[in-house]
């Protein structure tokens, strides 16, 4: 996971070089910030798996809000936009995990988990048939 993480940080550095020419290099900070949160969330899931730990619902949802990638994708999609209306306030808004983003991340994660469970149940049933 470390080589992938390092490669992504290098991409952010390249983006910063380009955006410096346009006076928008401060945007990269927010992308890196969200990417680091995502890496920590995936690491936590790996720790849970390796320890055989099943988190309670609150622990799971708190981590899932980040691991669904809504925040990182929302932030990184704005970094390179040329719109003059993309301000630091917008990045700060996303960084503070507003209710609308937390709710949509939670819904997305739970829908994904339900569909994964349904597929695994179907596979289990077909194994015994």
Image (cartoon, rainbow, N blue to C red):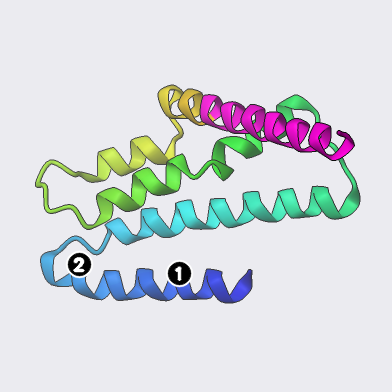
**Residue under the image location 32 percent in, 43 percent down:** 91
The residue beneath circle 1 is: 8
State which mark lies toward you, 1 or 2: 1
Residue 58: quarter of image:
top right
Q: Viewed as shown, does residue 86 lie left or right of 32?
A: left
- The disc, 1 or 2, on the residue closer to the chain's N-terminal end is 1
**Residue under the image location 22 percent in, 57 percent down:** 80
Residue 70: quarter of image:
top left
Residue 19's mark?
2
Q: Secondary structure at mark 1?
A: helix
**Quadrant location of the N terminus in the rendered image:** bottom right
Gap in Å between the C-alphas at discs 1 and 2?
A: 16 Å
Q: Is residue 91 above or below residue 81?
A: above
Q: Position of residue 48 (x, y in %)?
A: 81, 48
> Label 2: how many residues lie within 10 Å, few (<14), some (14-19) or many (20+)?
some
Q: Provide the residue span drawn in magenta.
A: 106-129
**Residue under the image location 59 percent in, 33 percent down:** 112
Q: Position of residue 16 (x, y in %)?
A: 28, 70
Q: Nearer the viewer, residue 66 or 20?
A: 66
Was residue 114 drawn as part of the magenta stretch in this picture?
A: yes
The answer to whether the residues at label 1 and label 2 have Cβ atoms under 8 Å apart is no
Q: Viewed as shown, does residue 53 lie left or right of 42?
A: right
> Label 1: how many residues lie within 10 Å, few (<14), some (14-19) or many (20+)?
some
Q: Position of residue 73 (x, y in %)?
A: 39, 47
């Amino acid at each position: 996971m470390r080589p992938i993480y390092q490669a992504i940080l290098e991409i952010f550095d390249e983006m910063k070089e380009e955006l410096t020419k346009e006076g928008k290099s401060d945007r990269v900070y927010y992308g890196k910030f969200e990417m680091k949160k995502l890496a920590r969330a995936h690491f936590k899931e790996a720790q849970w798996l390796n320890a055989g730990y099943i988190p309670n619902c609150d622990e799971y949802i708190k981590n899932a809000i980040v691991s669904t990638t809504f925040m990182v994708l929302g932030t990184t999609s704005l970094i390179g936009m040329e719109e003059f209306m993309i301000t630091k306030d917008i990045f700060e808004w996303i960084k503070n995990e507003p209710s609308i983003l937390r709710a949509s991340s939670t819904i997305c994660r739970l829908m994904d988990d339900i569909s994964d469970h349904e597929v695994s149940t179907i596979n289990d049933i077909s194994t015994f048939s």
